[in-house]
Each structure stands twice: as structure tokens, then as C-alpha cells.
Image (cartoon, grey):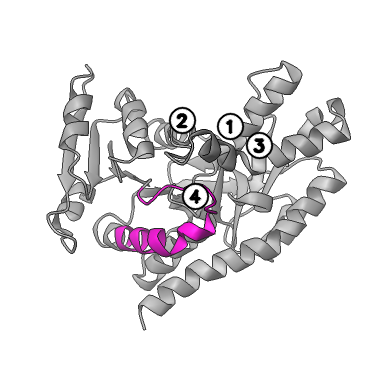
Amino acid sequence: MKLAVLGACGGIGQTLSLLLRTNELIDELVLYDVVDPVGVATDLSHIPTRQKVRHFCALTKTDESQLRMALQGANVVVIPAGIPRKPGMSRDDLFNINASIVQQLVRVYGETCPEAFLAIISNPVNSTVPIAAEQLRSQNCFRPERVFGITTLDSLRLEQFLGQLTGAWDLRGQVYTVGGHSGETIVPILGKWRKRLSSAEIQDLVHRVRYAGDEVVQAKQGKGSATLSMAAAANRFLCGILRAICRGDTVDEVAFVNVSRLKTDDCFVQKIMHKVEFFGVPISIGPEGVAKVKCLGSLSAEEKEAISHSVPALSAQIAKGTRFVKASKL
């Protein structure tokens, strides 16, 4: 099992690489960055595991040979590369810089290891995942069941904040978020916990989950963003993928995926799937990738309204990513 981290020297990349270093299912952990990751790789190599750690760095701004070597034979590729958010910066503000980074990395992925599972962290996820899909389509190697936008952090935040409210923990699977990965496109699904909270508590909880990233940026006083929690979220998601590939397990996760070609028995989800190409949904993942979209279960009127309300904004952000790739090829 070879897993490649593209952007391994950043705040997310370093912490994620540390967490992945202790995963017994990974035989080879590959670190790539435009800043030489030799120091990170050396540091990790002092942690006793059977893993082999390798590092690659672009020799020049236009060099792709090292990236190709890093990706050769990879089974899983994760992309945290890009600039972090700064005070007053929205995820959309990140677009112009991170869009180009993601497109280049995905293009080389498509040329080198298009069968590998591809997980994207780089923000804005609502646009970078469509960028990846459109780029891979242009190379005739898009496999929608193996391309994911990691939105797990929104669910982790929901679990944590709800736990603080109720004193209940281990809420994984009981609550989660759907939709997108920014602002009002994030829709918390509370299940049975909705009945245990007041309307005011629910309103405050939903708002805090949606804008928790701003909370971190402000708390770090402009010196960072949500790197540690994002790395933890990505690690949880990747651990599920690794179990699916290595052990043949069927794992349940939530991710921002291409829903237009997936199957589901949920009538409400089917309606959403006809309106938008990408959506964050609970999914079952097997050795070949996404098997199906899981049912959302009983939704409140407010949750249904919030999901419907998220669609126009998501559609615009998805279209923005798609246009970026098409324009770059003119």
C-alpha cells in the first residue's frame, strides 16, 4: 500500500503525515512538496514502524519529474497542498491560487496513477473537487467512485460541539453534515438529537459548525488556520479508505463526491442528485470505491429546507471550478 501526500510540508500535510506514519496498513508513505520535505521525512523516519518513508521535491517551478516519481504506483493520493485561509479570507478567496495548484497536481496524477483513490483537502473543496473531475475528464480517466472531497472536519466539529452541549460523546454516525464545505452549504443532520435541543440551541449549533473555520483563524490571530483538526479529520477518512482497499471492508463515510452516477434508495437524495453534480453525502465505500449513497433517514423540515437552500450556491461554486479548467485549455 503506497500513499502519497501532496503538500506534505504545510500545516495540514505535516500533521497528517505524522498520523499516517503510525497506520499499519501503509507500506510506503510518500511526501511531496515544492518545499523540500527532507526534514519532515527524516523526522518521521525516526518513529519506529515498518513503513518506508520517501520524499520528493520539485527541482524548479516547472519541474514535474519528482511529482511523477512520487505518484508512480500510488494506491491512495491525498492533496492538502495550497495556501491556508487568513483573517477576513473566505474559501472563495483562496480559489485563484489553489485552483491552479490542484489542477496541476491532478493532471500529473491522471497521467501517472489514475486508478488510485484521490482525496482532496485543498480549499475551496466545493470548487477544487469539480476542478479535479473536469481535468480528469479531459484526460479520459475520471473515475467518480474514486475521487473524494474530504468534508469530514464539518462532521467532527458537529460531534464535538454537540457533545459539549449534551455531555454525550462517541457520536460518530449519529450526526454528520451534508452539502458542501463552506458556510451555508454545510448542513448539519442531527437525527434523534434534534428532539433533545431547543430551537435556539440548534440555531447556535448550526451556525457554529458552519463558521467554525473562522473561529480558528481568529483564535490563531492570523498566524494559521484549522490545520490540526483538518489533519485529524483527513486521517479518519483515509483510515476508512485504507480498510476498504486492504481488508475489503465496506466502510461508511461522508464525502463531497460526484453524485450524478451513484445509486441511492433515498428519494429526497435522488431529487438533489438531479439538481447538482457534486454533493456531500453519507456513502458506503468498498475496495472499488463508492458503492452507493446511503439514506439520510428522517429529516426535519428545517434540514430539508437547508439542503435545498444549499443547492444554488453549490451549483455556482461547482460551475466556477469547471469553468476554470475549460478556460485554462483555451
Dot placed on the residue nearer the N-terminal end, 4 or 3 = 4
Mark 1, Cα crowd under 10 Å, few <14 / some 14-19 / many 20+, is many
Q: How far apart are marks 4 and 3 (CA)?
A: 15 Å
The residue sitting at 67% across, 27% down in the picture is: 161
Callout 2: helix, strand or loop?
A: helix
Q: Is residue 8 magenta?
A: no
What residue did someone put label 3 on?
A: 176
Which residues, given as a range, are shown in magenta?
81-106
Dot placed on the residue nearer the N-terminal end, 2 or 1 = 1
Q: How far apart are marks 2 and 1 (CA)?
A: 9 Å
Q: Distance between the residues labelled 2 and 4?
A: 15 Å
Which mark, residue 156? 1
Count the numbered circles shown. 4
Q: In which quarter of the image is the N terminus?
A: top left
| 210, 24: nearer the viewer | 210
The residue sitting at 50% across, 55% down in the picture is: 124
Dot placed on the residue nearer the N-terminal end, 2 or 4 = 4
What residue did someone put label 2 on?
A: 232
What residue did someone put label 4 on?
A: 149
Dot placed on the residue nearer the N-terminal end, 4 or 1 = 4
Q: In which quarter of the image is the C terminus?
A: bottom left
Image position of 290 (left or right of 120) = right
Q: Can residue 56 be seen in this view?
A: yes
Task: Indicate the amino acid at tag 1.
Answer: Leu
Q: Can you give x and y, in whole percent of width and height, for residue 308 in the image? A: 76, 58
